[in-house]
Image: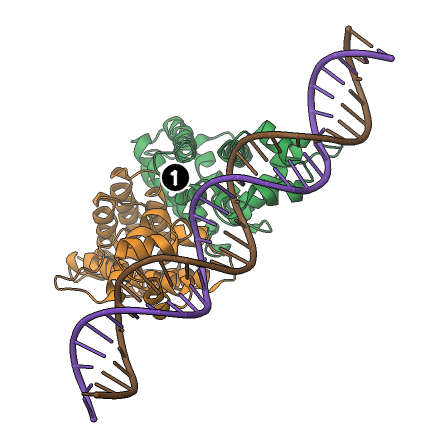
Chain colours: A orange, B green, C purple, D brown
DNA sequence: AAACTAACAGACAGGTCTGTCTACCAACAG
DNA sequence: CTGTTGGTAGACAGACCTGTCTGTTAGTTT
């Protein structure tokens, strides 16, 4: 999801260099589109070192997904908090993270959707992508509940659909109107689903 | 996007067999996840024959995208028509295609989003996926205009975001609640965007 | 009958992929 | 001084990838 790579000012350990490089390359080309040799070359690490930290390439992909999960979920929470204390406002505010991500150089849609598209449905990697979406939706559901939504599950599903739509559109083109319209639609849906205006 | 493969009852030509097989395999595993040899083996065709009809693998992928485009766009139009003559109802009705696709065996999300995720942004293939989404959105925009929407572009953008969200969710899991909620959200958005109720 | 067309069958080249292995080096702890 | 830890450098195996090439077979047209 086009989040910032974890940066380190000081000299990084081999593990960190591998993860940073993998993050950058995997997000840009998809895990399947990047060979282990490329990660090795660009991170300036020995092959044995990479395979010591990540015995199989899939382990590296899972670590990459964990990194993205933290970054993106963090961005969503930050955007929600920035919208104020009212859960109702936060439900709309979290779409700010979408706009921020979309404007970032090299934005290429949702890392989880993109990775899920190229992984087998039963695999560990696919399961991890599903898990991420489940956790995010659970968080939105809780927010919807606190916002007094008539049916929090329903509102959360609708909002995450919009969010995923905005992210999915990002893999095609990074048109900034998508996040803006997603936010506007979210406002309408929240207004329709929460009985009494909080203010 | 999980549309039906073109079927032929009689003996198919080599070209048709190649396209049908490519459709099935590419949709299930992604174009990059299927080797030309596999397409050859499963379609029972000689290698020279495949390369005669499709000089490069990319040509086969483009033909695959054309097939999906026809099938999915056709399904959208059919679902819209099935909802009646009122453009307003058609805007909601087109989401029926999402539910139908989602319930199909082997449903795996949107072929265009999935393919775009694994293709380079400047490539022919990527351009074709963008073109498809553009055409669909233009069609929805026209529908929104005929429905008397205050801002047809805006409503179309919001509805296609929902549609893409529903399709993107399909690559994670084929939960049938997603299409249902997408449709419900579409109803709310259409109601909010079209000034006077038609009836 | 002869020529042409479409397809089949499969070897082959040249490249890339993952993952394993050997050998070496530098820092540091006891 | 010696053993351990963490890293570098790169050869190697075995599989798979795309795309080309040779040769054969069957049906159709002239």
> Could you say whether the residue bearing mark 1 is in a helix, strand or loop?
helix
**Chain for numbered disc 1:** B
The spot of residue A100 in percent (x, y) is 21, 48
Residue, x 44% and y 45% (percent of image)? B114
The spot of residue B162 in percent (x, y) is 39, 45
In the image: residue B35, left or right of residue B140: right
Q: Which residue is mark 1?
A: B160
Residue, x 57% and y 41% (percent of image)? B36
The spot of residue B14 in percent (x, y) is 68, 31
Residue, x 42% and y 65% (percent of image)? A56
Front position in the image: A91 or A19: A19
Front position in the image: A64 or B93: A64
Classify mark 1: residues with Cα within 10 Å, few (<14), some (14-19) or many (20+): many
Q: How many numbered tags mark residues here?
A: 1
Residue A138 position by quadrant: bottom left
Q: Quadrant of the C terminus of chain B?
A: top left
In the image: residue B33, left or right of residue B113: right
Is residue A32 at least partly visible in the picture? Answer: yes
Is residue A193 at least partly visible in the picture? Answer: no
Front position in the image: B117 or A25: A25
Toward the left, the furthest residue is A9
The spot of residue B180 in percent (x, y) is 47, 51
Front position in the image: B87 or D13: D13
């Amino acid at each position: 999801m086009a989040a910032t790579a974890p940066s380190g000012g000081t000299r990084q350990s081999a593990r960190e260099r591998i993860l940073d490089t993998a993050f950058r390359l995997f997000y840009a080309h998809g895990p399947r589109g990047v060979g282990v040799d490329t990660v090795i070359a660009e991170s300036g690490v020995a092959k044995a070192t990479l395979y010591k930290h990540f015995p199989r390439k899939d382990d590296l992909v899972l670590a990459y997904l964990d990194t993205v999960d933290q970054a993106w979920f963090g961005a969503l929470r930050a955007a929600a908090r920035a919208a104020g204390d009212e859960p109702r406002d936060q439900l709309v505010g979290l779409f700010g993270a979408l706009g921020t991500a979309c404007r970032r150089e090299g934005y290429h849609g949702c890392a989880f959707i993109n990775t899920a598209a190229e992984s087998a449905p039963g695999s560990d990697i696919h399961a991890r992508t599903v898990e991420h979406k489940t956790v995010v939706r659970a968080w939105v559901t809780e927010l919807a509940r606190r916002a007094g939504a008539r049916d929090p599950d329903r509102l959360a599903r609708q909002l995450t659909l919009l969010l995923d739509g905005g992210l999915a559109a990002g893999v095609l083109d990074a048109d900034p109107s998508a996040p803006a319209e997603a936010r506007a639609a979210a406002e309408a849906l929240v207004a329709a689903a929460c009985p009494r205006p909080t203010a």
